[in-house]
Image (tube, rainbow, N blue to C red):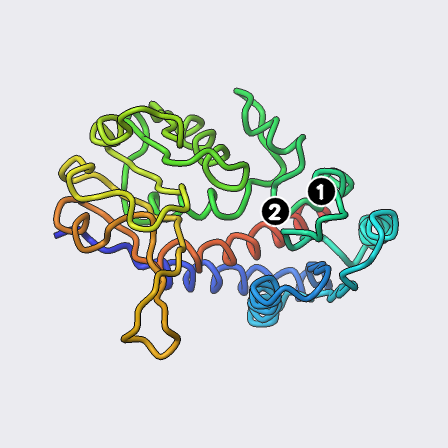
Amino acid sequence: MAQIIDGKAIAADIRREVAAEVAALSSKHNFVPGLAVVIVGSRKDSQTYVSMKRKACAEVGICSVHVDLPEDISELALVAEVHRLNADPAVHGILVQLPLPKHINEEKILSEISIEKDVDGFHPLNIGKLAMKGREPLYVPCTPKGCMELLSRSGVTVKGKRAVVVGRSNIVGLPVSLLLLKADATVSIVHSRTPDPESIVREADIVIAAAGQAMMIKGDWIKPGAAVIDVGTNSIDDPTRKSGYRLVGDVDFAEVSKVAGYLTPVPGGVGPMTVAMLLKNTVDGAKRGIVE
């Protein structure tokens, strides 16, 4: 049976470390890191994520700056809002909750965030530096950074290993493959146009599943003893639940847990890490401001 990687417990450790850093900044330099969380409109799922992030800030002592904007805000007005936050010295990180309404160009908005405050790590300059050898981005995207942290804190060696990333999104698949490469893994990316994906996944010592397909990765896809990080969150119908559904990952947990060496559950694996890494990025950004 696989060793289950407890993302909740590891994220709680990181939050404790961040809280200690915030307290030290406060007593030594008499200042508090600030994170602006911008939400446009009233999508239920986005509101849930935003309130989670704001609550997490409060728990570690980061000052959360609330920016709630109407659904019909113009692109120009949103850009102006981002520029205002760029110029605010009390704000060390800016996060714009995606997706944005259809009439707003996400790429335009994200590239307007100051690279020094891009705690999500999605600025093209940050991604570009992540892709280049010998360059370091100011920030690494939170979910991929969380995946790497789960591996390292579970004692999984990455250097010299074969890693396969399932999915090529800008948010997870692509950046996590670049991080694995930086950590000296040999990396393959499997995606919707890959013929016979299971034969490639079967060779992996490390699998990062981020395809957004419920329970796609079966037990016979996995090399015995491999470390499997499941980034997927998919809801499937479950009449036995009060809500009528339950959350599952991209990995068939029941099957894969019999074969893998390490496995993250869904929920309680990668999810809590994403928010913990956001807090860590915010504090790192604030500390960078002091040094400079």
Q: Is residue 193 above or below residue 242?
A: above
User: Which mark identifies residue 120?
Assistant: 2
- Whole-percent x, y for residue 179 in the image: 45, 33
Tag shown at residue 234: none
Seen at 30% across and 73% down, the residue is: 239
Disc 2 and disc 1 in contact, CB within 8 angstroms: yes
> Residue 126: x percent and y percent?
63, 33
Q: CA distance from mark 2 to mark 1?
A: 10 Å
Q: Let me know if residue 237 appears in the view.
A: yes
Q: Which residue sits at x=63%, y=51%? A: 99
Q: Nearer the viewer, residue 48 or 54?
A: 48
Instruction: Inspect the image, locate mark 2, and give the three-letter code of the amino acid beneath it.
Output: Asp
Total of numbered circles in the picture? 2
Q: What secondary structure is found at the residue carrying circle 2? A: loop
Q: Is residue 259 left or right of residue 212?
A: left
Give the residue drawn at x 34%, y 65%.
Answer: 237
**Earlier-in-chain disc, 2 versus 1:** 1
Q: Nearer the viewer, residue 277 or 212?
A: 212
